[in-house]
Image (spheres, rainbow, N blue to C red):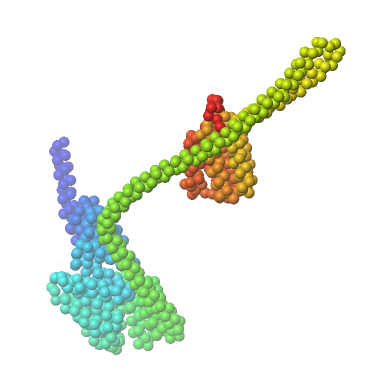
Amino acid sequence: MIFLSCNKKSHLDKNIISQKDSLPVYLSLANDINLSYDFKQKYAQKAFSIIVDEKNDSVNRINLFKVANRYYNMNDLKSYKTISQLILERSMSAKDSSSIAKAYTYLGDYYGAQLVSDSAFRNYFKAQKIYLQINDKYNLSKTLLSKASLQYNEGDFFESEISVFKALSILKEQKDVNDLLYECYNLLGILNNEKEEYSKALEFQNKALNTLTDKTIPLDLQLKATSFNNIGFVYMRMKDYKQAIPYFQKGLQEKNLFEEKTILYAMLLDNLAYSKLKSRNMEGLPDLFYRSMKIRDSLGMRMAKISNQIHLSEYYAFKKDTFKAIQLSKQALLLSRSSDKLNNTLQALKQIAVVDPKNAAKYSREYILLNDKMLKAERNMGEKFSRIEYETNEIKDQNSSLQEKNKTLIYVFSICTLIGLFFYVYKTQQAKNRELLFKQQQQIANEDIYNLMISQQNEIELTRIKEKKKVAQELHDGVLGRMFGVRISLDSLDKIDEAEAAEKRRKYLAELKHIEEDIREISHDLNREKSELINNFVVILNKLFDNQKNTYPSKLETSFDSHIKWELVNNIVKINLYRIIQEALQNCNKYAKADTIKVEFKSEIDHLVLSIFDDGVGFNVRRTKNGIGLHNIEYRAAECKGTAAIKSAKGEGTLLVVKVPIDQKINLQKNDI
């Protein structure tokens, strides 16, 4: 068993070693131009399957970049994008700024190839900012050039030129950067050619050609052939076709051009043939056009064929073969309309208008409309690039200043905390002082009410004494005197005969009946006095209500539950209830605009309930809950160990309910008012 397990482990180790050894082979085969597309796909997939499960380190990310390059060279842009996004995620996870920036450039290349210019520009610009931060000048210049090429393709020549000059200003301080210097000069030559500044265009193209003396630049890039083509194209734009022909011929003579840059080879053939046509040198025509078109067709370059078809249309128009000329120009127009590049359609319309004069007006109108559309699209794209750059710069500025802002924020927060703490202590003390002052004012008010009630009690007491004297006088002077007279008269009945005595007895009994009625009346008066004595709090309230009725137009309705034993209600409760009613009536008079006000006392089990309702305008209880008047009512209810509830809404009146606990069983008459 030990032997077998050792063999198994050894076998696994060999597999791991063989996988690592095979990775460079797979990467090399995936880039072999001699292999078919399917074989290159197969080897690229094998390389990726090895790399994807490895640890996320710098070597792993470098290998992923290599696989992405293989897919880009195969024109498998979907796989190229997927791997580029994976690299971006891993680079961000590892906080590898250099790889993040490089992944952004790869995504920029993808969107550029897909003609999604705004997304391409955004990714290039993100990469530019990161390279600027990490001071990677070489890659910064490279990214600026990619951005400049994109701007050129979208017709934003001015901004493209600015980007190139930015790259040049960085590269002039660097060494061994002739490959990028070549790209800068070459693009500046192309830009000046577009602006019809031909002398400058030739100057920059010659500068680009001179940088190729550097032997470190790979020959398989075929940059010399590119420069010859571009110089020849400048002469074409100048309509100096005889001068252009030698440069196109030099380009075609470059070694291995067809194998290494087939696309450029086809372009040179087309440009050479067109220059010959324009200079009326028919040698090799139209074969050169057809060779170029055949190569482009084999490469799947459908849009590039438009140039061949237009040039062939011109050739057959020159040869007076109108049918073929119209046929080729129509083919070019049909093909160009399936493209997003309006410039192709414009060239096709221009040519067909020349060879088909009968329909020239129709094609010319379409040409004008499309030309306006193209100019507008170019302007919009330029504005979009500027907006993307502005927005990205704004985000960067915000991020760069964030740390400084955070420091400032900490200081400000600390100071604000201290100030806030100071104000909290100050406001708390102020609130305590206000509460103390409020309690003092309440105490003074309570004393005033108490004095008022004492004064009222004294008045009632004087009235009671006065009534007592009156009753005593009536009993002494009236009832007792009459009773004494009846008693004497009854005593005298024994001295007279029975018949006369019976008559007088009836008379005296009637008199006694009258005396009994007088005593009953005096008793009723005494009971009424006792009731007034007991209910003097109600009397005080009625005086408040009478004052309300006489002063304000609102109708006041009052109701007292007869079951309430006011003599058992504590003086403190009476004082606070009086003040609550007074406060509530004052609020009704000031704000409610009510037609009717109802004040009602009810007796519940162990509770006294005061409810005050008005049919006025009402108010928002939440917004007004901190009002002084409402606060006073709640405070006084709490003083009585009770509760105060207010219900109101705009246009629905207001209801105040105060519920106070009372003990109606214990006799507290000593404390009664």
Quarter-wise, where is residue 184 in the image? bottom left
From the viewer's side, name the closer residue of 552 and 599: 552
| Left or right: where 504 falls relative to 454 | right
Residue sitting farthest toward the right: 499
Measuring from the top left, give residue 554's x and y in whole percent. 62, 47
**Whole-percent x, y for residue 116 in the image:** 34, 67
Question: Observer-nearest residue: 89 or 367?
Answer: 89
Q: Residue at x 51, y 34 (%)?
A: 572
Which quadrant holds residue 240? bottom left
Any part of residue 257 in sight: no
Q: Quadrant of the N terminus?
A: top left
Residue located farthest toward the bottom when viewing the structure as drawn: 280
- Residue 467 position in % (x across, y down): 65, 29
Frontmost residue, 631 versus 138 = 631
Left or right, 512 with respect to 426, comes to right
Looking at the image, which residue is at 17% across and 73% down? 172
Say which quarter of the image contains residue 549: top right
